[in-house]
Structures are given as structure tokens and as C-alpha cells.
Amino acid sequence: MRVEFRPPNWTERLLYFAGRRIAFLVEGDSMAPTLKDGDTVLVRPRADINVGDIVLADHPYRSSVTILKRVARIADGRVTLAGDNEAASTDSRTFGPVSIKSIIGRVECRLN
Amino acid sequence: MLGKLNNNTATGLRIAEAHCDAPCGVYDPASARIAAEAVLSLTKKILDLKAPEGGDPKAAASFHNTMARYILIKEEQAQLAKEQLLVLWTDYFKPAHLEKYPNLHDTFWKAAKLCSSVKVEVSLEHATELMDAVKEIHGVFWATKDRDVAWYTAS
């Protein structure tokens, strides 16, 4: 499942200015070609997540790092995360499924 | 939850990492060999250290101090040898290597178990077996890199 990210519509822009969306700068190419290094995305905090969504999550071992990955599976309160670009991604293949509590939010759209 | 996030200094935006953690890619069984060799050496020293005769408290203290240091370092080095072997096993070796060397898992498993044995025991036999296991891993490791690196020891 691929999510095409278009520039945000007015609702998203409004929600961003209202503080309901957080802008993040994408670093790295693990989500290429969907999202590339240098892209800016709007994240909706505490959104419900489904398989196929791109989410922002706390890194399981590095507390100051947040990671951007796609949800591959949700089971028993744990989420399996996978980069779209397998060759350039450290994800649940390495660190296993993460707790659903470590999911910060869902990527809604790309700003640039 | 959101307060501790990194910011990008140029844009002021928070950063979402979409990376691959970068391993340094530098592997060499030599680090395990040095630790295993230290275990063998300390095992010999422990077996050779004689308890002082007579009731001299200074000699007794010195004996216990030396013995305690030998034991401490032997355990540390046995643990280090195990860690270095596990890094090679889990990080360096890939499924393709396993096809070519079907005994690989068994070799590492036994070597790791020997690290546990030599940590707990004072066994010259197991310490020597650990050196043999590291030598075998040295051979497989360099063969996967198509390099002919001769086995050597420091002592």
C-alpha cells in the first residue's frame, strides 16, 4: 500500500497554524521514494494508526531520536515498522516491533 | 514526549529520522583472540600461583590480592571474548556465509559456551579449546573476505 503525499489542502494548513499538526524535517532515505531526505511533513499527533500509514515513533533504544517508518503490522499492542527503502532502513527487522505507545503520530501530508 | 526532540538548526524544524543506523563495518576476530589468549594466560597463572606457607599475614594478603586480580581479569576477558564473538556472529556473518559454511552457527554457539565455561572454571583444557575455536573462526572469517591472513598469537 502506497500513500501519495500531495501538498497540504487548506484544512491541513489551518490545522498546522492552529497547532494541531507538527512539521518535521525528514532526514535519511529509508522512506524513499515516498519521502526523501530534506522533505518536510506534517504529523498529526495521537492519530489512530492503521497498517500502511507512515508514522513518527520514538526510537526504541535512542531516547532523543524519533523515526519515520511505515506500519507493516499491528498486533497485541505492538507495531512492526518498516522503511519503504529496505536497503537504507533500520527498522523492526533490527529492533523488533515497537510498543504502540511509542507512536507519536501519523504523517498527514508533505509540505514541499 | 515531544519536548526532547532534536531540532534542525537551519530550519528550526524537528527532525524525523528515516535512516539506516551506520555500522562502522570494521570486523576482525583478532579482538576475540586477544581476549581468549588473556583467559588462557590467566588460567595458567591461577593454577601456578602458590599459596604462602607459614602464617605471615602480609604474604597471605599478597597471595589473596594477586589471586583475586587474576580471577577478576580472567572473568572480564572471558566476557569480552564472548561479546566480540557475538558481534562477529550477529553483525558480520550473513545468510550467504551460512550456506557456504553450514557449521557456522554451531561453531559460534560452542565458542560462546566455552567463553562461559572458562569464565566460571579454572580449566586449561577449555581455555585451550576456546583458542582453537577462535582459530577456526579466524579461518572462516578471512576466507569469506578472500584474504589469506595467517593465524598468530601474542604470547
Image (cartoon, coloured by chain):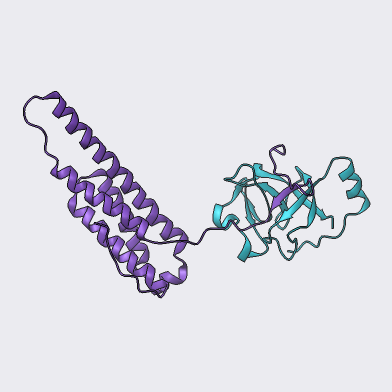
Q: Would you say A12 lies left or right of A93 here?
A: right
Of the chain colours in the picture, the one used for chain A is: cyan
The answer, for residue B113, to whether it is visible in the render is no
- At horizontal 38% and vertical 70% (from top left) the residue drawn is B142
* Residue depicted at x 90% and y 49%: A13
Color of chain B here? purple
Image quadrant containing the N terminus of chain B: top right
Q: Position of residue B12 (x, y in %)?
A: 78, 45
Task: Name the foreground residue: A72 vs B64.
Answer: B64
Q: Measuring from the top left, give residue A101's x and y in whole percent.
A: 65, 41
* Percent x, y of residue A78: 61, 48
Name the side, left or right, on which A79 lies relative to B32: right
Please tell me which residue is depicted at 29% across the width and 42% down the height of the picture: B73
Q: Quadrant of residue B104?
A: bottom left
Relative to B110, is A79 on the left or the right? right
Q: Residue at (32%, 52%) from the top-left corner? A: B35
Give the answer, above or below, for where B106 lies relative to A15: below
Relative vertical location of residue A88 with respect to residue B17 in this rendering, above or below: below
- Which quadrant: the C terminus of chain B? bottom left
Residue B54 visible in the current orientation? yes
| Left or right: where B149 falls relative to B50 | right
Q: Position of residue B80 (x, y in %)?
A: 36, 49
